Image: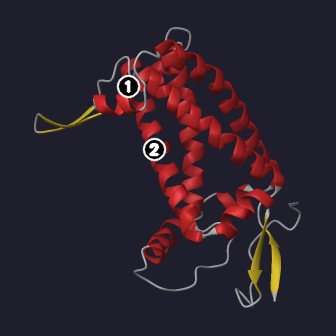
Amino acid sequence: MKRILKKHPLAIRWFHWINFPVLAVMIWSGLLIYWAYDPYTINIAGKEYFHFFPKSFYNTLHIPYHLAEGMSFHFAFAWLFIFNGLLYVSYTIFSGEWRYLLPNKKSFKEAGQVLLHDLHIRKYQLPPNKYNAAQRIAYTAIIIMGIGSVITGLSIYKPVQFGWLCAFCGGYEAARLEHFVLTIGYVLFFIIHIVQVIKTGWQNFQAMITGVEVIPNDRYPNTAIQNNPNEKA
């Protein structure tokens, strides 16, 4: 026998599926802008080990000579990114979803256990919570990163008009570097997130589309996933 568990409310699914392509376009258009001046490298003891990014990288993705196009897409989608982010944060606050997303005092310790479980170093059943400790930390970090991207982005876009923001970031060059580092963080999050989705299987992916998950009755027989009892799929 199987049972159906409500997992993700409609609003969360909408915000997720809107934000994913928007952020992808932001990263792509950001690369078009970055290509015009790409100073960042990894240097150790004065020796350059990696340049962000090699010429072959730009050529493979056909990035060169599209600066104006990149700026147009980046600034246009930035407002959609901000609007969707504001709606998402507002929804989590007023709906009570924040209770399942924010880390608690045990989350950082439990996140290590989740990592050991995912690496198959320790084999045990994770607690049947809606989001595990690692997910709580990661999803909260993404919100903070989003705020950081808006602050640094505005500092780069209008360094004179938003001079106080630019100064808060440490100046124009510092804001640009911080914006770049945040972008690399998004890419790493995307990679890890997609790998985790593939690893957990179709049911987890389907839940973000339909809002429900079909599970066997013998899975978590004496417990229930910690969901908001008022949420609707």
Image quarter of the C terminus: bottom right
What residue is pinned by disc 2?
A: 185
Q: Is residue 169 visible?
A: no
Q: Is residue 227 above or below residue 138?
A: below
Give the SS element for disc 2.
Answer: helix
Q: Identify the disc placed on residue 85.
A: none
Packing grade of label 2 (10 A; few <14, some 14-19, many >=20) is: some
Measured in 3D between alpha carbons, the distance from the residue under mark 1 to the one under mark 2, in whole angstroms, is 16 Å
140 sits to left or right of 13: left
Q: Position of residue 113 (x, y in %)?
A: 47, 75
Q: Is residue 2 above or below residue 200?
A: below
Q: Position of residue 203 (x, y in %)?
A: 69, 70
What residue is shown at x 42% (from left), y 15% (from top)?
65
Position of residue 90 relative to residue 128, above or below, is above
- Choose top left, top right, bottom left or bottom right for residue 162: top right
Specify the amino acid type for callout 1: Ala
Return the residue at label 1.
174
